[in-house]
Image (cartoon, rainbow, N blue to C red):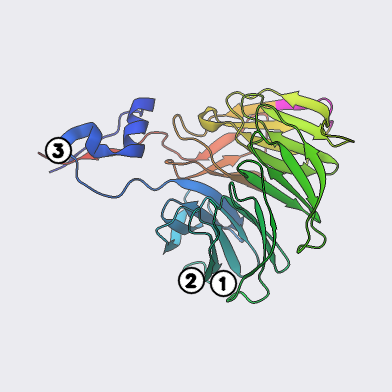
Amino acid sequence: MKWTSTRRATPLIALAVSTSLAAWVGPRAEPGPPPDRCHHVQVRDKIAYLGQTSGLATVDVSDPTRPKQIGRLLLHATVHGLTLDEHHAYLAAGTRGLFIVDASDPSAPEVVERFDTPGMLRDVAVAGHHAFLADGREGLRVVDLEDLTRPLQVAWVPSRQEVRGLHLAGDRLALAEEKAGVRVFDVSRPSAPRETTFLDVEPAALDVALLDDLVLVAAGSRGLLVLRPQGGRRPELVSEVPASGSAQRVTVHGSIVLVANGVAGLQMIDISDPANPRRLSTVQVHRVASIGQLVMEGDLAYVAAGLAGLAVVDLSRPETPGVLLPRERTFNVTFADP
């Protein structure tokens, strides 16, 4: 017989769940794999593609309040980042490198090829038949995907610190390199990236997004920085928006910027006037689950929420966002009999 506790989780309980139940409850706990965490999400045609600790999951979100998993690809690798094109998913899988996946049938994704990299692959962007890889301390790699069964590296740009995030917008690519700041490249010739801008960022650049002539940086304890490149290493600081926690991720949808502040939640900011950004709201997606990547589709934000899995936030009214998922903001922990 088993009994289940549905008490509201505390930070202590969350830590126990994320590391080892056996270490918390002693010999009564059943051995098993660690809980699956959701690190990244992309959405296409009402299907959410989730980068998880154990690989890729595909979820039907045609009814965002009742998601239904339809497929799974176990990789024994943590998918930190992913992107999609018409028929394929490209998975940034840490020390396992880049997985190229046939996702034409979302219910049965299959690996086409794997491209190994020497670093910790954290993120990937694809344009045409080129992939741009954020390879941790090993910098930026550009891979030719014209033949998906034979990916070929065509360029490498070393970095001074770990590349935490990247954003591709047209022919411009931005890299967030922690305390080394942000670099922006012209990638109109993918085989020869040309650095056009270097931005000092304090205390660290953890993620980056490009919007017109602006560079938006998730800068940890400083929150969101809105920068405009100019001559030299010092950009114009257009505005600064304090974070309710530590700004870890940033994405932009129209004039609305979404900033993931770790466990503190998701912050909505209107930057239609970049010099005077307007904080609209902050919503806590889950009491103890930290937010990873997020993406906007219409009025919905799909959020990779760690141990809480996929979260969905209704932003049709950004001043009063509504959390559609998770509906129960508690962890269920099951104990075995002695």
**In terms of secondary structure, where does tag 2 sit?**
strand
Determine which quarter of the picture holds residue 30: top left
The rendered magenta stretch, by its main secondary structure, is classed as loop
Tag 3 and tag 1, C-beta contact below 8 Å: no
Residue bearing the label numbered 3: 27
What's the CA distance linking mark 1 and mark 2?
A: 9 Å
Q: Is residue 178 above or below residue 108?
A: above
Q: Quadrant of residue 214?
A: top right
Task: Identify the residue at image location x=86%, y=34%.
Answer: 232
Q: Position of residue 143 (x, y in %)?
A: 66, 65
- Under circle 3, the secondary element is helix
Q: Earlier in the sequence, mark 3 or mark 1?
A: 3
- Label annotation for residue 301: none
Per the model, the C-alpha gap separating discs 3 and 2 is 39 Å
- Which residue is label 2 attached to? 110
Expressed as whole percent of the image width and height from the top left, the position of residue 42 reads 59, 54
Q: Residue furthest left?
A: 338
**Mark in the foreground, 3 or 1:** 3
